[in-house]
Amino acid sequence: MMWQFICCCLAAQTSYERTQFLNRLQEALEARGSDPLAQDIGLDFLRYLTKDEALTVLVERRELVRSLQEQLVLHQSDDDLITQIMQDHLQTVLNAEMQWLNRTIMLLHSAQCEEI
């Protein structure tokens, strides 16, 4: 959900950009299930962004993940086993996301340096 939020809130969207966004969203939703790369609608939008735009969005996503990780630590509970299992799952997903974001941001930075 956080990824879709970032994509919906890109700065200075014109009427044309909003139309393009809605068209791409519809295409992504229709492709779900048939296109293995369309499982995360937010990631599907990477193909439509420039490298600079993708880098900006991914850095923002990394900050959201970092914030969620911090919140999870602050609200960690030892109340019951099910809560612990749920918290462990979310922490595992966030850790994997952070690793992927760090690698991807490094790749995009490298690609920018090669273009200069």
Image: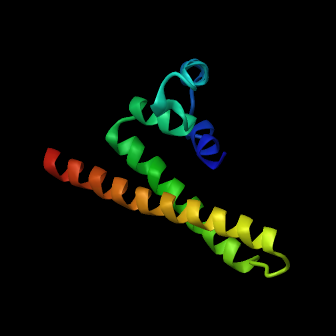
Which percent across, then down, holds residue 1? 66, 45
- The residue sitting at 64% across, 74% down in the picture is 70
Residue drawn at (39%, 61%) of the image: 102
Q: Position of residue 44 (x, y in %)?
A: 48, 33
Q: Is residue 31 visible?
A: yes
Q: Residue furthest front?
A: 81
Q: Is residue 68 visible?
A: no
Q: Which sits in the foreground, 99 or 2? A: 99
Say if 8 sits above or below 18 in the image. below
Residue 8: percent from the left, percent from the top? 62, 37
Colouring scheme, one of rainbow, by chain, secondary structure, one colour: rainbow
Tell me the residue at 42%/29% (across/down).
48
Pick whichever, 99 or 114, lies toward us. Answer: 99
Q: In the picture provided, is 65 more to the left or to the right than 77?
A: left
Residue 42 percent location from the top left of the image: 54, 38
Q: How many marks?
A: 0
- Against 101, residue 10 (above or below) is above
Q: Residue furthest right?
A: 79
Would you identify the image quadrant in which residue 99 lies?
Answer: bottom left
Image height of 83 relative to 57, above or below = below
Q: Residue at position x 14%, y 49% from top?
A: 114
The residue furthest bottom is 78
